[in-house]
Image (cartoon, rainbow, N blue to C red):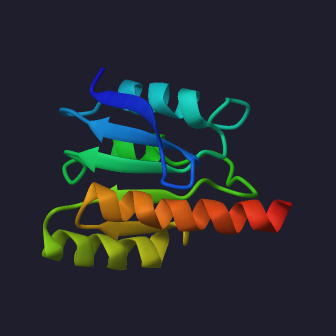
Amino acid sequence: MPIHVSETKTRSGFVVLRVEFEKEVSVADAEGFMAQVGDGTKYERTPYVVTGNITSVSSDVKRALTPQVKPKNPPSVAIVLSSAVARMVAGLMMRLSGPADSEYFKSEAEAIEWLDGVAADFAKKIS
């Protein structure tokens, strides 16, 4: 499958999904991924870090990766992009059109550290 999903943990022990786009992703691949992490699954509120070839996904795939119904508490998403220009453009686009709970990072370590803080804040909020 072009989208490889595995679990990892933050330094504080929060579970994070590591999502790697290994090659070109089809709409069916994206729908399969959403079936794993969407509402009613064991990962429905689990934050994830996205790595790999994500800058070339088609608009149809992007639509398939967007929940049909906006969740009340969507999971946080940390996206790793090695290019500073790509991070800047993607961040601008996301702020204009996407969820506020996504950020872009240069490294996976930075992304997981951010997710650790977000998960800790969420845990405090619901306790």
Q: Quadrant of the N terminus?
A: top left
The relative height of residue 80 versus residue 45 in the rendered view (above or below) is below
Q: Is residue 92 visible?
A: yes
The relative height of residue 117 versus residue 6 in the rendered view (above or below) is below
Q: How many marks?
A: 0
The reply, left or right, for residue 20 in relation to residue 99 is left
Residue 108 image offset from top left, x and y in percent: 29, 55
Residue 49 image offset from top left, x and y in percent: 40, 50
Residue 78 image offset from top left, x and y in percent: 41, 59
For the point 49% across and 51% down, which residue is it?
10
Q: Residue furthest top?
A: 1
Residue 104 image offset from top left, x and y in percent: 34, 68
The reply, left or right, for residue 8 in relation to residue 88 is right
Q: Is residue 58 visible?
A: no
The reply, left or right, for residue 48 in relation to residue 119 is left
For the point 25% across and 49% down, which residue is it?
54
For the point 31% across and 58% down, which residue is it?
109
The relative height of residue 64 versus residue 40 in the rendered view (above or below) is below
The relative height of residue 112 versus residue 14 in the rendered view (above or below) is below
Q: Quadrant of the C terminus?
A: bottom right
The reply, left or right, for residue 103 in relation to residue 45 is left
For the point 57% across and 48% down, which residue is it?
13
Q: Residue furthest right?
A: 127
